[in-house]
Image (cartoon, helix red, strand yellow):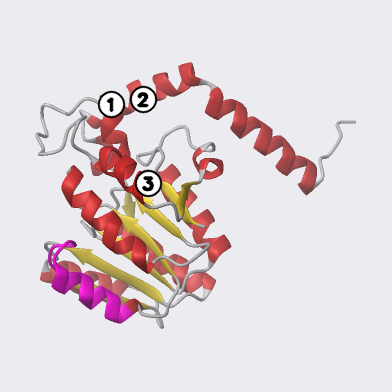
Amino acid sequence: MKKILSRMEFEKKRVKNSSNLYKNRNLHQKALKVKVEANNKYYWVSLTNWFDEPCLQLTQDLFAFQEIIYKTRPDLILEVGVAWGGSTLFYLNLCKTLGLKGVVGVDIYIPKDLRKRLTKKKPKNTYLKLIEGSSIDNKIIDKVKSIIKGKKVFVILDSNHTHDHVLKELTEYSKFVKKGQYLICGDTIIAKQPQSKKRPREWNKNNNPMTALKVFLRKDKKFVIDKKIESKLLFTNMPNGFLKRI
């Protein structure tokens, strides 16, 4: 009869498997090739919905977020880069399940119809505050600060991906993260993949969140990269972007 593992034995096996996965550079290169080809077909931004709203995050990244949020239990989730709102609803559902307060979302443009849909679809007794404006505008930063003052916050930076913009976000929004909580630097994958010819952007391999992150981490020693989280992810848009405040 096959031995049935205990939960502790199973966890040890999972840790070993994730370590072996993380060390397999050949497999990761193959995964990156698949991701690049899929990205050229708009796969990552086109096909996944959460409660019928487009969700632009990879499913593996969302699972990583929920694992962190479950363990750290922040009061609020600060999402910088709302886009089409699917990920916002995902976080709101997590808040409802875990008894967290809610979500603060910041974006340069938040359509009125999206506000209405998110307000209608959000779970009862969860807090949602949507702030329209540039995430690096000092007025917007001050507004966020007044809302989250004194609270534990899980921060996701996923808006404009240029070096200067992300570095400003990292510098300012890292101040809101308390010890033991997380700051996510989104789309660091840009440094590893060629720019899509169909989707020209300001950012590129030499001007992106990863270049900003490296500068930030050289200056700020209060954050470390959580490799334990990343080691589980074959597909991620956030390599080296899972930062824990120590």
Name the secondary structure under disc 2.
Answer: helix
Give percent across and percent down for residue 125: 41, 83
Up-down relation of residue 146 to residue 161 (above or below)? below
Q: Which residues are magenta?
A: 132-147
Which of the 4 quarters of the picture holds residue 77? bottom left
Assess whether mark 1 and mark 2 are in contact (beta carbons under 8 angstroms): yes
Give percent across and percent down for residue 8: 78, 47
Q: Residue furthest top?
A: 26
Question: Is residue 210 left or right of 75 when viewed as pictured?
Answer: left
- Frontmost of labels 2 and 3 is 3
Give percent across and percent down for residue 186: 31, 47
Q: Residue at x 86, y 34 (%)?
A: 3
Cα separation between marks 1 and 3: 27 Å
Quick one: label 2 or label 3, which is nearer the N terminus?
Answer: 2
The residue that disc 3 covers is: 217
Q: How many other residues sit within 10 Å of disc 3, few (<14), some (14-19) or many (≥20)? A: some
Magenta-colored segment: predominant secondary structure: helix
Looking at the rendering, in which quadrant would you find the N terminus?
top right
Q: Is residue 53 visible?
A: no
The residue that disc 2 covers is: 32
Quick one: label 1 or label 3, which is nearer the N terminus?
Answer: 1
Q: Residue at x 19, y 74 (%)?
A: 116
Give percent across and percent down for residue 111: 11, 66
